[in-house]
Structure formats: C-alpha cells, structure tokens
Image: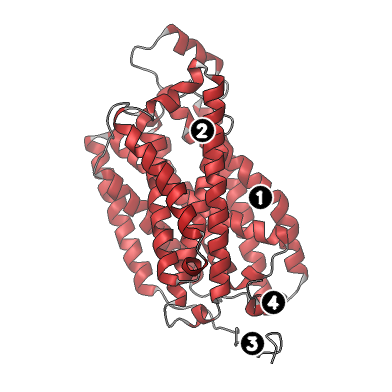
Amino acid sequence: MSHEAAPLPDANLPPFDGGRLLMLGAAIAGAAGLLLTLLGGFFNARAALLAYLVAFVFWLGLAIGAASLVMANYAAGAHWNVTVRRLGEHVAAIVPIFVLLFLPLFLGARYIWFWVAPQEPISKETLELLAHKRIYLNMTSFIWRAVAYFAIWIGIAWRLRAVSLQQDESGDPALTISARRLSAPGLVLFILSFTFASFDWLMSLQPTWYSTIFGLYVYAGSFVASLALVCLVVTGLRSSEEPWGKLISVDHQHNLGKLLLAFTAFWAYMAFSQYMLIWAGNLPEEVQWIVTRSRGAWRPVGQLILFGQFVVPFFLLLSRDLKRSPPALAAVAVWILFIHYVDVYWIVMPAASFDRLGLHWTHLTAFVGVGGVSVAASLFLLRGTRPIPVRDPFLSDSLRYVQP
C-alpha cells in the first residue's frame, strides 16, 4: 500500500486540559523570582535592573521568534507545519504580559540607560554626540516607540491566533488565505520593529556606538532560540504519552532540526557581517563595542558564544540521525537556549563594566521570574484550545508529510 493510501491518524483532539501543575508551578516560581529581583533592586538597583533587562530580552525574543516562525510558514505556503503550528501561536500570544513586565524598565530607566540622566563626568565629544541624538534618545519618543512595538507585536500575533482558533469552529478555508495575506507584511513589520527595539533597549546602552546590522544580529539570535524552544517542546511531546505528540511525526521533528541548522548558519552570517563591517571601517565610534567584548574577562565569553552558538550546534545538526532522535535534538536545543542567554548577557553587561563579568544573584531570579510568568501565560492560553488546527485545509497534508 502506498503512503498516500495509508489511513490517517485521528486528529480530532479535544481541547487541551493538561499542563495544570506545570502552569501553577511556573506561575509560583515566576512570582517568587520577580519578588526576589525587586528585593535585590532595593540593595543594588543597577545590577538588578540590568539582570532584569537580560531576562526580559531573552524571553520576549522567544515570543517574537515564535510569531515569526508562524508567519514565515504561512507566507511560504508551507503545509508540513500544521501539526506543530499551535506551539508557535501560543508562545507568540504571551507578548501582552511583556507590556506589564516592561514597567520596571521604564521606572528604572535612569539606572539602565546612561543617556536618560548623564551624571558622571563625561567628555565634551560624548556630550556633543548625545546632543545630536537627543531627538531620538529622549524618554518621550522612547516610550512612544515602545508603545508602537508592542501594538504591532500584539495585534499581529493575536490576530493570527484568533484566525486559527476561529477556523477550528467554522472550517472556512478563507481564514487560511487571510492569515497568509497578513503574514508577509506582518513578518516585515516584526523584523523592522524588533530591530528598532534592539536599537532602543540594547544598542543605546552605549549611546555613542552604532551598528546598522545590530538589530538583525539580535533578531537572528532570538529566532534561532525560538526554533530551539519549539524543537525542545516537540521532542518532549513525542516522548510522552500525550495524544498530541502522536500526531507529530519524526519527519516533522526532522524538518524543525533542519530549520535550526539553517538559521544557526544565518545567525553566524549576521555575527560575521557585523564584525567584518566594523573591522573594515575601523572607526573609533564603531570599534569600541567589539574591543570591549574582545578583551579581558569578556574575551572567553565571546569565544564561548562563537563556538557554542555556531560551531558546535552546526556540526552536530549536520547529522540526520541526531535530528531524528528526540533526546539528541532536545540536548542540542537546550544548549542553544543556554548559549543564547549568554549572548544576550554578553550584549548587555559590558555596558555596565568593561573589566568584570558583572555576575549577580538577580540574574537567576530575573530569569526564573520572567520565564516562569511567560511559561505560565503560554500554558494558560493553550489550555481550553485544541492543540491541533483540526479544520485547517492542509492538516491532512501535514499528517501525511514525509521527508523528501
């Protein structure tokens, strides 16, 4: 019997009601982590807020990357991903909680971004550069831009999720067309908005430095990390007794592994492009960022990122067997997520200390706090909805999918 003629598994799953204990545990851990980070802020506001910024960018980047993955598949007209699409939709849908999580950064802005309230003695040249950038780097425009970013992310992510859930009830194929029409321009808006958010929240930590490719570097890292997160969840589902996992085949997992390999290489290209352009230009206002992160205590961190985020996962993911093995792919995914956190740390913390790593216990509490709330919110949104788009017109294609 041909593969096409084989009977399809029953995908008409009831609404998901699992993950209750994980959701409650994540919520409690998140609340405790945020509270401890707040307490840490009373003793050392700058250290706690910088740790919080690292965690905020890491977890928000996962949501932005997940939304981008959903839109990229829609825009490409992909059919294979239908059985795993809900993962991306519900991770992307947590963006509204980051509006609330942004408030500590807004309230403590003067402790994070030097340009908000310059106090220490600074050179005349630096003052002149800040004056030139004042039309962009001021709190009024900073806040309005943040409002615009969140409006774009929330509007598009929730619209895509709503269309998908509505199709579960109506089965209207026109909803798929609507999602595709939104996804192509939506993907462009996500890339541009996250690029400018990276300028505002990360690049302006050193306000006299600039790089036109910096936003794409941060975006690429977040996208790779979100792919790693989806791979981790998929391998967990496939290794469990969850009915949802039975509908995700080894070929779906293999495809996610191939995407992870491809965009690991893309991240490396972005990193090399940024370094090459700065090296070739050799301008004092550009090289300071690279020089700071290439010397002293930060040099081994940069080397770890180079090998850990590109060399090691790239050569491991070349293996077909690894991509098809749930434990092996899960291990690589966990490693990529860890290195991505180190990468965000490496971007943020040298702005506070050029010669020290700036390790502080609030890095752990902030990571657990923001992460716990994020995981709990995603599970809360997932519970009560069908884990598979049961009336998507291409669901049968996804269930039949095999590697070419």
State how far apart marks 2 and 3 are (Cα). Answer: 49 Å
The numbered mark at residue 8 is 3
Please tell me whether mark 1 sits on a helix, a strand or a loop.
helix
N-terminal label among 2 and 3: 3
Q: Alpha-carbon neighbours of circle 3 within 10 Å: few (<14), some, or many (≥20)?
A: few
Q: Quadrant of the N terminus?
A: bottom right
Residue 140 at x, y = what percent?
Answer: 53, 29
N-terminal label among 4 and 1: 1
Residue at the spot of label 4: 397
Which numbered disc, 3 or 1, marks the residue closer to the eye?
A: 3
Horizontal arrangement in the rendering, residue 228 relative to residue 110 (left or right): right
Which numbered disc, 2 or 3, marks the residue closer to the eye?
A: 3
Q: Are marks 1 and 2 in contact (CB under 8 Å)?
A: no
State how far apart marks 4 and 2 are (Cα). Answer: 42 Å
Please tell me whether mark 3 sits on a helix, a strand or a loop.
loop
Q: Amino acid at mark 2?
A: Asp
N-terminal label among 4 and 2: 2
